[in-house]
Amino acid sequence: MLGRDTMSDSAAALPWLVIRQDDNGNRYRVGRYATQGEAQKVADKLDEHGHEQLYWVERVGQSTRP
């Protein structure tokens, strides 16, 4: 065992999240990505479906939604 925190390691390697909020206000992490651009592409593609859900990108530890 190396004694490293794997959660911190993955946050450093994949610091961008795509978050989904459904019409009931429930939030879910859709995925983690290495770059903001990659995460935004995923969020935009999901948002194209035109459902009631909201998708956005945020950096790990920095929630941008209330």
Image (cartoon, grey):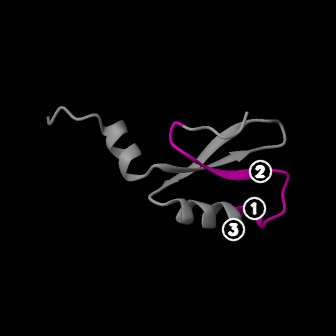
Amino acid type at circle 1 is Asp
The structure residue drawn at horizontal position 42% and vertical position 52%, both measured from the top left corner, is 14
- In screen coordinates, is 11 left or right of 65? left
The structure residue drawn at horizontal position 66% and vertical position 60%, both measured from the top left corner, is 43
User: Residue 16 magenta-drawn?
Assistant: no
**Tag 1 near tag 2, CB within 8 Å:** yes
**Is 38 situated above or below 60?**
below
For residue 47, the mark is 1
Q: Residues within 10 Å of mark 1 (few under 14, many from 20)?
A: some
- Boundaries of the magenta span: 46-61
- Looking at the figure, which quarter contains the N terminus? top left
The structure residue drawn at horizontal position 50% and vertical position 42%, both measured from the top left corner, is 60
Q: Residue under label 3, please give it.
A: 45
Residue 12 at x, y percent in the picture: 37, 47
**Figure disc tally:** 3
Circle 3 sits in a helix, a strand or a loop, which is it?
helix
- Which is nearer the eye, 59 or 22? 59
- Which is nearer the eye, 47 or 12? 12
**Tag 1 near tag 3, CB within 8 Å:** yes
The structure residue drawn at horizontal position 56% and vertical position 38%, both measured from the top left corner, is 62
Amino acid type at circle 2 is Leu
Q: CA distance from mark 1 to mark 3?
A: 5 Å
- In screen coordinates, is 7 left or right of 32? left
Circle 1 sits in a helix, a strand or a loop, which is it?
helix
Q: Earlier in the sequence, mark 1 or mark 2?
A: 1
Amino acid type at circle 3 is Lys
Circle 2 sits in a helix, a strand or a loop, which is it?
strand
Q: Residue under label 2, please give it.
A: 54
User: Residue 48 magenta-drawn?
Assistant: yes
